[in-house]
Amino acid sequence: MILNRGNITGVVLAGGRARRMGGEDKGLIPFRGKPLVAYALDALDAVVGQIFVNANRNHAAYARFGYPVIADRTDSFDGPLAGLLRAMQAAETPYVLTVPCDAPLVTGELLARLCTVLRETEAELSAAHDGERLHPVFLLAERRLAADLEAYLVRGERKVEAWLHRHKLALADFSDHPELFANINTPAELAELEKSAARSAAPAIPDRL
């Protein structure tokens, strides 16, 4: 299938408990004057045709960004795969692209690279790799894998990487820009990334896919 923005649905994963942030809803925490979720939404808007926000609380606050808000099917906070499954069930496109809500350096260029790798390899999934480690929630997946993912979760499985490796997985090489995956899990990490961002120029806005 030809891969273009019209057949990709994007989803921001903002459904976690954020225990290390004291239970604050990470997507709504301000970073350089904007809520963290806004950076993920901007990046997705460059490469997809439709966007959802996956959130399990503060639905009204997320809805103000102008995109549909979808919650997990359960209230047990089952992790990013539960958010991916919910997006697969809600989407009408053959592909779903996920990004976390807590990585404000994400760009449309990064996400477009996932699309390029999937197209070139004819894989079922593509995920980002920074040269040292996999970043499995920066993920482009075929929506037809929803049934397999649902069965995996029903069995009580939650590990993202283990599910990815059940399928034909392509890795998008980001060893040239590992800094793009800086994410925020604690107040200290938020403060450090604020300082780092203030010292450097903001990333250029990439061309649309």
Image (cartoon, rainbow, N blue to C red):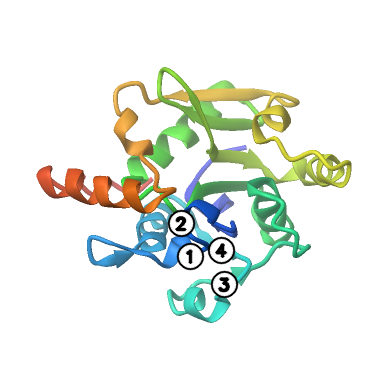
Do the residues under discs 1 and 3 have CB atoms within 8 angstroms?
no
The vertical placement of 151 against 27, above or below, is above
The vertical placement of 21 against 57, above or below, is above
- Say few, some or many: other residues with alpha carbon within 10 Å of mark 2 (under 14 / 14 to 19 / 20 or more): some
Q: If you read the primary sequence from the N terminus, does the residue marked by circle 1 or circle 3 appear first?
A: 1
Q: If you read the primary sequence from the N terminus, does the residue marked by circle 2 or circle 3 appear first?
A: 2
Question: Mark 2 and mark 3: span between their CA atoms?
Answer: 25 Å
Do the residues under discs 2 and 1 have CB atoms within 8 angstroms?
yes
- Amino acid at the residue labelled 4: Phe
Residue on which disc 1 sits: 24
Do the residues under discs 3 and 4 have CB atoms within 8 angstroms?
yes
Residue on which disc 3 sits: 68
Question: Mark 2 and mark 1: span between their CA atoms?
Answer: 6 Å
Place residue 206 in its image quadrant: top left
In what quadrant of the picture does the C terminus appear? top left
Q: If you read the primary sequence from the N terminus, does the residue marked by circle 4 or circle 1 appear first?
A: 1
- Amino acid at the residue labelled 2: Met
In what quadrant of the picture does the N terminus appear? top right
Which residue in the rendered view is the most extreme toward the top?
A: 131
Do the residues under discs 4 and 1 have CB atoms within 8 angstroms?
no
Q: Nearer the viewer, residue 205 or 151?
A: 151
Residue on which disc 2 sits: 21
Of tags 4 and 1, the one toward the viewer is 1
Place residue 155 in its image quadrant: top right
- Say few, some or many: other residues with alpha carbon within 10 Å of mark 3 (under 14 / 14 to 19 / 20 or more): some
The x and y percentages for residue 26 are 45, 60
Question: Mark 3 and mark 4: span between their CA atoms?
Answer: 5 Å
Residue on which disc 4 sits: 52
Point 81% across, 45% down: residue: 153
Of tags 2 and 4, the one toward the viewer is 2
Place residue 58 in its image quadrant: bottom right
Q: Nearer the viewer, residue 70 or 111?
A: 70
